Image (tube, grey):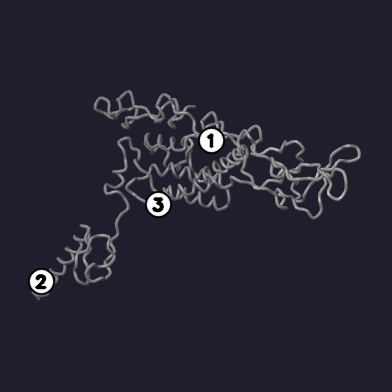
Amino acid sequence: MKSVIKLSVFVFAGFLLVVSVLFAGILVCRECGYENPEGKEACVHCKAKLPVVKTSKQPAGGQAENNLSSGRVKFIDPTIVENEIQMAQKIFDTGDFETANLFARNAAALEMLTDPAVKGERSERIVELRKKSETGGMTVDRKCPACGGTGRLMIEAQAMDGKTTNIEVAGKSCQKCSGTGKVMRPSTMDERRFKMGRGMSRYTALQQSRKYVQTGAAWIPVDLEGKLSVKNIIQVKKTVAGPCPACMGLGRVDCSKCKGQGELKCTFQGCVRGKVEVTEDGRLVKGKAKRDVKCKNCNGTGFVACVECRGKGSLVCKKCNGNGERSLCVKCGGQGGITCKRCQGSGTSKDTICEECRGEGVLECSSCNGDGRKR
């Protein structure tokens, strides 16, 4: 009986030893007893499968460690950012690039509020989504200006009354569009601004339906309203600060000379739809003969690049110098926040928490409302 008791005590002590080692960050192999560092799936010594230790994703200090003295939170749940990324990807797959870009931009702002210690691939995915959504839809199919969308070769002919009419040449394809009737051209800045406006309307409706509320130009879940610190609010607002009103953040405006098309009709003397009529001595009969040759100025296309914008269709926005952003706020220097005057940034006043800044030592700039940009 005594031997049985001793054996039970020994087994229980061994169990406690294993448990204590597990919590100490060491995994003990059940087969050979070798102590393996935490994170290993198989024993280094005998290759046997190690027990799985469940670890909490919460900070070591728990929820209390995530709270400031003001009662507001330091970091937000990364799941919020993940949901925003998934929304951006889902909408991008439908071809709505403008709305997808707005969701990706909001995800970038919310990612700034997550704990830096909790690593992931969210930032890389956000950058990739923004890159694809900003370049998507930059080109459009337009009706060919040479054939009017018919795809047929058109020539000008003079009628008996002296009027010039366009005649379609049967069996001949338009040289400019190769018979398709359409040409690929970059979207004008006005067209892109129009699409962005429609995208913003859809984005706003979707965020409201998800019970998100607006903070500056960013959107946060309604249960986070009033829980973010002043520094976090400023950071979010700065990340999604409103763009230059003249170019809507594009950094460029349409060229007034070519109306954003990037090309103009060839004005070379005698050029008609890329052809120039020349007169030369006849080879078979005496006298002069006339024939059409390719215009050297436009290479037979009938159009030349706009000299004002050099064929780009747009010019650098003079208001923002091409960066697409508003000027920095003079009062806060673009920081979005100012030091609390009552506590001089210490967060305490007369040995108590400052009532003005609630212990955070910083306030939103009243001039720019926290986004760091001049209004």
Does residue 183 lie above or below 334 as drawn?
A: below
Amino acid identity at mark 3: Glu
85 or 22, which is in the foreground? 85
Question: CA gap, disc 2 to disc 1?
Answer: 82 Å
Residue 330 appears in which quarter of the rendering?
A: top left
Earlier-in-chain disc, 1 versus 3: 3
Does residue 326 lie above or below 202 as drawn?
A: above
- Disc 1 crowd, CA 10 A, few/some/many (<14, 14-19, 20+): many
What x and y, as percent, mark residue 327? 47, 28
The label nearer to you, 2 versus 3, is 3
Q: Give the SS element for disc 2.
A: helix
Residue 66 appears in which quarter of the rendering?
A: top left
The label nearer to you, 1 versus 3, is 1
On residue 121, the disc is: 3
Earlier-in-chain disc, 2 versus 1: 2
Cβ–Cβ under 8 Å for marks 1 and 3: no
The structure residue drawn at horizontal position 28% and vertical position 69%, both measured from the top left corner, is 49
| Disc 2: which residue | 6
Q: Give the SS element for disc 3.
A: loop
| Disc 1: which residue | 251
Amino acid identity at mark 2: Lys
The structure residue drawn at horizontal position 64% and vertical position 32%, both measured from the top left corner, is 256
146 or 226, which is in the foreground? 146
- Disc 2 crowd, CA 10 A, few/some/many (<14, 14-19, 20+): few
Report the residue that reaches farthest toward the right: 160
144 or 215, which is in the foreground? 144
The structure residue drawn at horizontal position 82% and vertical position 44%, both measured from the top left corner, is 281
Q: Give the SS element for disc 1.
A: loop
What x and y, as percent, mark residue 42? 27, 67
On residue 72, the disc is: none
